[in-house]
Image (cartoon, rainbow, N blue to C red):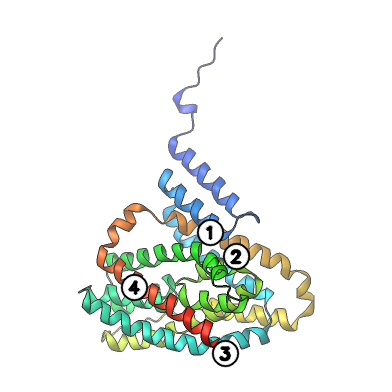
Amino acid sequence: MKFIQSEENLPSFSTSKKIIFIICAVCCALPFVSSPIALIVGFVVAQVIGNPYEVQSRKFSSILLKFAVVGLGFGMNIFSAIQAGKEGIVFTIISISTLMLLGLLLTKFFKIEKVTGYLISAGTAICGGSAIAAIAPITNAKPNQISVALAVVFTLNSVALLIFPTLGHLFNLSQYDFGLWCAIAIHDTSSVVGAASKYGEEALQVATTVKLARALWIIPLSFLTLLFFKSSTSKISIPWFIGLFLVAICINTYVPFVHTISPYIIRLSKAALTLTLFLIGTSLSFKMMKNIGFKPLLMAILLWIFIGVGSLIMIMKFA
């Protein structure tokens, strides 16, 4: 007797999408998949089948990134980290103050909403989505203003992750110089670490240390934002995972037996990073890009070009 499978026995399209999504996510966590490839796969998946776990992906990618950053601390030495942080602080102070000022001028010139322009400037100047998330409550930003700022930053982040390693080789940058350039010129920590890890281990250590030291500037910027927007709120977000990153570096430096397990921790951290970038890729879409608007996108591109070119010239000349 011929068996005819009923419609109920067939997996639904929704279930199929979830299965494909999970398979792609697992594959992106494998050691041979690089950060740029993971991002591209995530973007393609988002366009073809969508993201069936959109809300969960946002939360999970944030947790994964923090885990990856802390884990990478087990591959670093405290003395090297201090040296990289000291040498990068001058570039950090100059670039943050210059970018925030230029952002305010471009906001007025393009007649962009004050809050939207400020969020884009903060995201470009410090650490992308983390800075936007920390500053947004202080500015009383509306959901659409936060969405536009995040969309702009994540879009340019993705471009930077793909092109920076190639540009680094083109300009014959050393591991140290490339790591420093990534930390200053790429918005979000995930893309900074992703680009630097593709370039080399020294670049990764320098980029991670300088970027996280840069992220601490969220705190003084938050206080300045309170004054600038005359906000009565006192809700200031402190990036606590940076403290754990420093603890991990200290443990790796002063507790010798950790060296036997640190390679495995680093391997897991890198897998978490590529999975994070896959999830970030799934949040990007052509529809999201259309909703950004021409002026905010142009402003963000100009800021990004300014910091990218300006920091590269300074590093090649003075670093």
Q: State the CA–CA distance, disc 3 to disc 2.
A: 24 Å
Q: State the CA–CA distance, disc 2 to disc 1.
A: 9 Å
Please determine whether, in this image, residue 223 is positioned above or below residue 48.
below
Asked whether the residues under the numbered discs 3 and 2 touch, taking CB atoms below 8 Å apart as contact, a structural biologist would say: no
Upstream in the sequence, badge 4 or badge 2?
2
Write the residue at 28% across / 68% down.
Answer: 296
Viewer-proximal residue among 154 and 312: 312
Category of crowding for the residue at label 3, using alpha-carbon neighbours closer than 10 angstroms: few (below 14), some (14–19), many (at least 20): few
Viewer-proximal residue among 49 and 32: 32
Upstream in the sequence, badge 3 or badge 4?
3
| Residue 150: percent from left, percent from top | 37, 66
Category of crowding for the residue at label 4, using alpha-carbon neighbours closer than 10 angstroms: few (below 14), some (14–19), many (at least 20): some
Q: Nearer the viewer, mark 3 or mark 4?
A: 4
Question: Mark 3 = which residue?
Answer: 86
Question: Mark 1 = which residue?
Answer: 36
Q: State the CA–CA distance, disc 3 to disc 1.
A: 29 Å
Write the residue at 30% across / 77% down.
Answer: 118
Residue type at numbered disc 1: Pro
Upstream in the sequence, badge 1 or badge 4?
1
Residue type at numbered disc 4: Leu
Q: Is residue 209 visible?
A: yes
Q: State the CA–CA distance, disc 4 to disc 2.
A: 26 Å
- Where disc 4 sits, the SS reads helix
Question: Mark 2 = which residue?
Answer: 198
Write the residue at 28% across / 58% down.
Answer: 291
Number of numbered discs: 4
Q: Nearer the viewer, mark 3 or mark 2?
A: 2
Asked whether the residues under the numbered discs 2 and 1 touch, taking CB atoms below 8 Å apart as contact, a structural biologist would say: yes
